[in-house]
Image: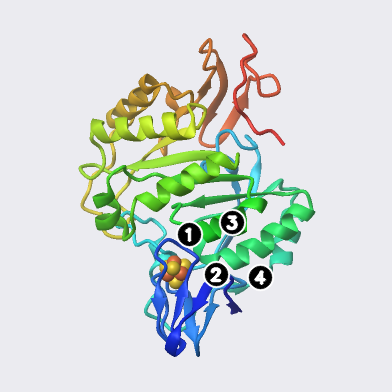
Amino acid sequence: MKETLLYKKLKDKKVQCQNCAHYCLILPGKRGICGVRENVDGKLYALNYGKAIAVNIDPIEKKPFFHFLPGSHSLSVATVGCNFRCANCQNWDISQGFKNKKEIPGESLLPKEIVKIALKNNLPSISYTYTEPTIFSEYALDTMKLAKKEGLKNNWVSNGFWSKELFGLISPYLDAANIDLKSLEDDFYIKYCGGRLQPVLDILKRLKNKKIWLEVTTLVIPTLNDKEEIFKKIANFIKYELGPETPWHITQFSGAMSWKLQHLPETTVETLEKAWNIGKEAGLKYVYTGNISGIPSEDTFCPECSTLCIDRTNYIIHRHDKQGKCPKCSANLNLILK
Ligand code: SF4
């Protein structure tokens, strides 16, 4: 465990965590909403520091990143814990399942050991993913600093529910982020995620202003966020606030492995394609469907002349671009290649 970097000491040994947008007030002996930050005698500690619950090598497309180091693999790491409690969570055993237990599960793995694994496997990047990197920010930050020194890139796959203080801390070391934009309705965030919408929108804009490569993901859940009106709002937010070159991933929900939504059906291909069309009609250059393979809406087409530039099937990609440009008209495809 390690003393956290972002918190305020208050009267009577209470503390206020400033790591995420919950800004939890925590009494001595208690933990915050994420379940991994504990007030020990007036000081706030990250109980999950150096305790990896998952370490894997994944295709970067699985995160999903389609424009950041395409075709590469990334070392993916996580600890237990999450500052949300999404009903649809597929990793709920590690994001929520430990919350009433005293022990924090995980294998001891130091930041320098994570970087060593990435280097040994010739991986160009480290992904902070699976649960929510916000709640292991100290562990991620120490790893990110070492990774940068070794020429590796860092990316976060996150719900975006960060504090502005956390943004200031990690953004100098962050190369790319894929942020979930689950809905543009605050009620959805309150009811199904245990969070709020506005802090996520603020962080998306901060990332864009800081020129950190950004991709946005919306998991489409039948009956909860699958209305055309919601797709239009999200597409317009991306276009006008983040820029039309920002990729939007629209992904299929599957209830079987979810925490609390086993009763809902899978998202239909028809619904995903409807959202895809809405994104394109709004003027987004790169809209992708996800979790369904073998349909053209997961390929990259030139935004100028519609030539197929990258085709993808099950994380296997075939690049037809020329160094990030369309092979036919040479338009820029907004790819981060190194
Ligand atoms: S990281 Fe967020 S959820 Fe966890 S203690 Fe801090 S403010 Fe609360």
Q: Which residue is mark 3?
A: 168
Q: Earlier in the sequence, mark 4 or mark 1?
A: 4
The answer to whether residue 149 is above or below residue 298 is: below
* Spatial separation of the CA atoms under disc 4 and disc 1: 26 Å
Query: Helix, strand, or loop for circle 2?
Result: loop
Reply above or below: 218 against 333.
Answer: below
As drawn, the label of residue 109 is 4
Q: Which badge, 2 or 1, comes first in the chain's sequence?
A: 2
Taking depth in this image into account, of 190 and 55 the one nearest to the observer is 190
Where does residue 97 sit, x and y in percent of width and height?
Answer: 38, 70
Kind of residue at badge 1: Ser
Q: Nearer the viewer, mark 4 or mark 1?
A: 1
Farthest residue to the front: give it: 11
Judge whether 273 appears above or below 15 on screen.
above
Task: Report helix, strand or loop for mark 1.
Answer: loop
Near-viewer residue (295 or 110): 110
Q: Which mark is residue 163?
A: 1
Question: Disc 2 versus disc 1: distance between alpha carbons?
Answer: 10 Å
**Amino acid type for the residue under numbered disc 4:** Leu
Alpha-carbon distance for marks 2 and 3? 11 Å
Q: Position of residue 280 (x, y in %)?
A: 39, 22
Name the N-terminal-most of marks 4 and 2: 2
Foreground tag (4 vs 2): 2
**190 lies left or right of 297:** left
- Type of residue at label 3? Gly
Upstream in the sequence, badge 2 or badge 3? 2
Query: Residue 62 versus residue 158: which sits nearer the camera?
Result: 158
Q: Amino acid at mark 2?
A: Leu
Q: Is mark 1 within 8 Å of ligand 1?
A: yes
Q: Residue 141 falls in which quadrant of the image?
A: bottom right
